[in-house]
Image (cartoon, helix red, strand yellow):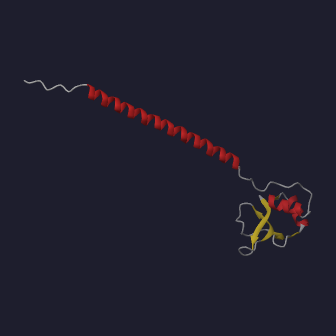
Amino acid sequence: MLKVRLQRTGKRGQAYFRVVVVEHTKKPKGKFLELLGNYDPHKKEFKVNMERVNYWISKGTQVSPTVNNLLVNYKYWDKPKMLSWKPKKKQATSDQQQTTKKETSSETTVEQKLTEETKEEAKQEEVKQEESPIEPAPEV
């Protein structure tokens, strides 16, 4: 399946992107079929050949969410924006942490009860041994 997506170029800290048509299984920095435009996020410049984009879309090529959102932002087309990433659910993780804390606290209380019971049993056995006098060995 072909996609219209961004290909990063430029050095570290100076990102510059190409808008390219590429097979979706290819590496992001690999060969592409056609260069459709470019995007400079530092200067906020986005240039794209819409005739070629429309041609590739008519052939069944899909547009990546990021490229779609750039086309919408720079008013190249009037389609709705797409969700390009999913935010992490912080609330769910904090709930899980709270439940694990509760589970561990309940486990520690169970362990504490068990250790207390074993200590009590040991004390009771000691008391029984002290109460029963040791009988002298019978003489033969």
The answer to whether residue 121 is above or below residue 25 is above
Which residue extends farthest bottom?
11
Q: Residue at x 87, y 64 (%)?
A: 53
Quarter of the figure with residue 135: top left
Q: Residue at x 92, y 60 (%)?
A: 77
Res. 64 in view: no
The one of 13 and 138 positioned closer to us in this rendering: 138
The answer to whether residue 57 is above or below residue 100 is below
The one of 94 and 50 positioned closer to us in this rendering: 94
Residue 117 horizontal/vertical position (percent): 42, 32
Q: Relative to residue 68, is residue 106 drawn left or right?
A: left
The one of 139 and 13 positioned closer to us in this rendering: 139
Residue 64 horizontal/vertical position (percent): 80, 59
Q: Residue at x 92, y 57 (%)?
A: 78
Number of marks in the image? 0
Quadrant occupied by the N terminus: bottom right
The answer to whether residue 102 is above or below residue 72 is above
Quadrant occupied by the C terminus: top left
Quarter of the figure with residue 32: bottom right
Residue 100 horizontal/vertical position (percent): 59, 43
Q: Residue at x 74, y 53 (%)?
A: 87
Quarter of the figure with residue 14: bottom right
Residue 97 horizontal/vertical position (percent): 62, 46
